[in-house]
Structures are given as structure tokens and as C-alpha cells.
Amino acid sequence: MDKESIKQSMVEAIKTVYDPEIPVDVYELGLIYTLDINDEGIVDLEMTLTSPACPVAESLPMEVVEKIMTVDGVKDVNMQVVFKPRWTKDRMSEEARFALDMM
């Protein structure tokens, strides 16, 4: 599989992870800042949380990593949780805004 196909599969996998407080997946919420894969199958992932005090701050990033690791072609994930830039509702996709009745 080429890198673009792998990346699309990673996005699909990430879209199965939901923030427990908001009925929208973490990708559409805009919590994924960087998602790249190199030729060796190593993924660089930067993500954030809606708040540093998020009750699932420990488990949510690990769930995202677990989902990415199920994708064919992925060998490892270098994951960083970052808080700069800060997450805002502006990062949400149109789909997420629609789901949350924020249009």
C-alpha cells in the first residue's frame, strides 16, 4: 500500500475513536494536529485534547495509537499530546459542527 492509502486508512481508524463527552470522533473534532508516515511505516502523530483537564487524558491518546497500529503498513507510532496551539471549536470540521448543531 502507498503512503496516501495508509494515511487514509489511519484516518478511518481514528474516526472510530470518540471523545466520551462529545458525540463526535476525535478526527472531526480537530484533535489530530499531525498525522504522517515515513517509508519505514513509522507514524508521527501529534494530537491534543479539548482540555488539559480532560477526564480521559490518559486513555484517549492510547486508544488512538491502538487504532492506528491496526492499519496495514504501520509499524510504530511516535505520539505526542500537545496543547499548543490550543484546541478551539474552530478546529472542528463542518461534519462535527453539524452533529453538534453548531451550524
Image (cartoon, rainbow, N blue to C red):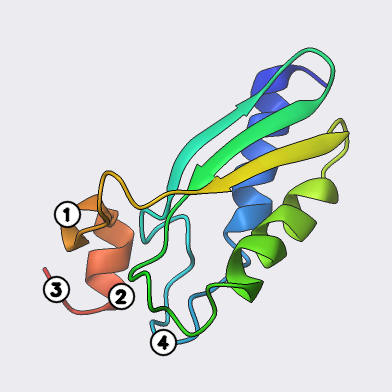
- Residue 11 x/y as whole percent: 59, 45
Q: Could you say which is closer to the camera, residue 18 or residue 46? A: 46
Report crowding for label 4: few under 14, some 14 to 19, many 20 or more residues within 10 A (C-alpha).
Answer: few
Q: Which mark is residue 102?
A: 3
- Residue 47 x/y as whole percent: 48, 49
Mark 4 residue type: Glu
Q: Can you tell which of label 4 and label 2 is closer to the viewer?
A: 4
Report crowding for label 3: few under 14, some 14 to 19, many 20 or more residues within 10 A (C-alpha).
Answer: few
Q: CA distance from mark 4 to mark 1?
A: 18 Å
Give me the residue at 33% from left, 71% from top.
51
Image-quadrant location for residue 52: bottom left
Mark 1 or mark 2, which is nearer the start of the sequence?
1
Q: Which residue is disc 4 drawn over?
A: 21
Q: Which mark is residue 90?
A: 1
Q: Which mark is residue 99?
A: 2
Mark 1 or mark 4, which is nearer the start of the sequence?
4
Mark 2, secondary structure of its residue: helix
State which quarter of the image contains the N terminus.
Answer: top right
Q: CA distance from mark 2 to mark 3?
A: 8 Å
Mark 2 residue type: Ala
Q: Residue furthest top?
A: 39
Mark 4 or mark 3, which is nearer the start of the sequence?
4
Q: Can you tell which of label 3 and label 1 is closer to the viewer?
A: 1
Q: CA distance from mark 4 to mark 2?
A: 13 Å
Mark 1 residue type: Asp
Give me the residue at 11% from left, 68% from top.
103
